Image: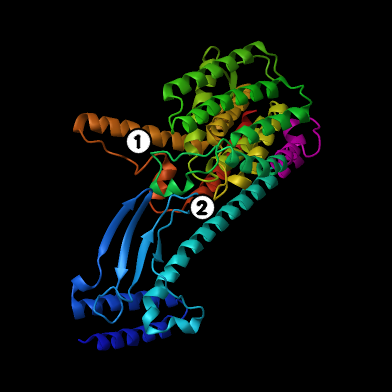
Amino acid sequence: MSTSSSFNVVWAFRGWYQLAFQSIPLFADIISCVIVLITRFLDHGFENMGGVRFFKFGPWMMTRWVFHHCMTGGESNGAVEYILTSSDGEDSDGEIILQPITDVDLPTSKENFLPTDDSITVTAHRFAMLGSARKKNKTVYGILNNIGLITFSTLLLFLVDQCAWRIVRLPLAPFYLMRPFMISAVVVSCVGYICVPLFRILKLRSIRRNEAPIRHSSKKGTPTMGGLYFVPIGALVAEVIVGFSSAEISGAAAATLAFAAIGLVDDFLSLKNNNCGLSGWMRILLEVAVGLWFSCWLYTTNLSSPYSMKMVVPFPAPLGLVCLGRFYPLLTSFCFVSMANGINLSDGLDGLAGGTAALAFIGMSIAVLPICSDVAIFGASMAGACVGFLLHNRYKASIFMGDSGALALGAALAAMASCTGMFFPLFISSGIFVVEALSVIIQVCIFGTTKFFRKTGFRFFRMAPFHHHLELCGIEEPKIVAAAYIVTGVLVLCGAYVGLISA
């Protein structure tokens, strides 16, 4: 088969495919490229078709595809070369894109897609545009996730405010929970436009974790330590609304800021020592110490609780009130450590930890409303702070909350449960964080056990925590976050109901 006859066959096939698939011309171009390669193989053999060569320099890994589709039998004169690229740059999306590496004139109109000399060039151009389109689609998904979360949260809080008098049996101010929620959300979102560029100037940039998927390399360099501004705002708004007169809010805010300080030290050491922060045991000891301090503070402080005795946990009937006595401080410390690390493990996808934490705060605010309305205000304010932060943390995130934010959010949830005894609704509303923590525990235990007995470790998940396992299964990041929001929304409704019937 001669070269000219091969190309006649190619363009005959190409014209037929474009007539059959006018709505998807990229498919016709792909088929034509395959036929070009097949005919070149029949005419000249594989050695003259161009090779596949590998390069590695700096942070780049490239696989270079060189297609010689000129009429000279594989000579470099007139050839157009392409590469599959993926970079670690700050503005990269982590997608693999086919790009030409020689100067080519791309067609500017639909009619110019048909010339015989530019078929592979046009296809490469369309492949390059696919990466940009996928990035835009993910960004749209991130915006839709935020819209859905804000709509659900606002409607739920509005409904609770309208029925609050039936829940508490006492007159409450209008928009009792909506007011702190909206104020915190607006203030945090506005302050974010100042802090995000400031953190970028100060070079408070995240470092990619070794255990994260490779596609997260594009997130390297994103500013971190977002908890430095949105956590204090959430606590301060709650204090201002109650007039700095609530012992419960003061104690919860103190515990929250203490955990934020632990996370801040960890973040700072990670940035300074190239991702080597506080050791795991040191961080857990500090968290346990804060939890024990909070338990002692609860025991010595007069709280506005309807119970005549402290250290009790309300359960639905027929259990009722269960007095834990000396076990209450242990449960409090466990709650602080587990919630803080659960949210920290969940902070691996854009918007995952912030959105699910906001929903968990709303669920806890509803659950504790009959017991301590001041703590409910604190939860609504922290939920609003998380929602305001999501404006900058949704896909593709312009800032991360860091350990200073994740640990603080876990401590705030634990403090709400410890002040009211609502541990059961807390673990229901925070089901996503429980699953994330359990996935890590299961992965470590199974891998360690199998490695001890069989000398080779077995990984139950492709990667832990669980959201990384879903990523490696091929599910896109915004879709994982959307699924987490939906599941958490259902769990929040269940947890709020359990809390109300328990109280």
Q: Residues within 10 Å of mark 1 (few under 14, many from 20)?
A: some
Q: Which residue is mark 1?
A: 443
Q: Which residue is mark 2?
A: 91
Res 86 → quadrant: bottom left
Q: Is residue 4 above or below residue 238?
A: below
Q: How many marks?
A: 2
Instruction: Give the CA separation, mark 2 to mark 1.
Output: 33 Å
Q: Was residue 160 drawn as part of the magenta stretch in this picture? A: yes
Residue 319 shows in the view: no
Q: Position of residue 49 (x, y in %)?
A: 24, 72
Q: Position of residue 254 (x, y in %)?
A: 64, 22
Report the front residue among 481 and 110.
Answer: 110
Report the front residue among 168 and 88.
Answer: 88
Cβ atoms under marks 2 and 1 closer than 8 Å: no
Q: Is residue 170 left or right of residue 350?
A: right
Q: Is residue 92 left or right of residue 321?
A: left
Q: Is residue 431 left or right of residue 257?
A: left
Q: Was residue 42 drawn as part of the magenta stretch in this picture? A: no
Quadrant for the N terminus, please. bottom left
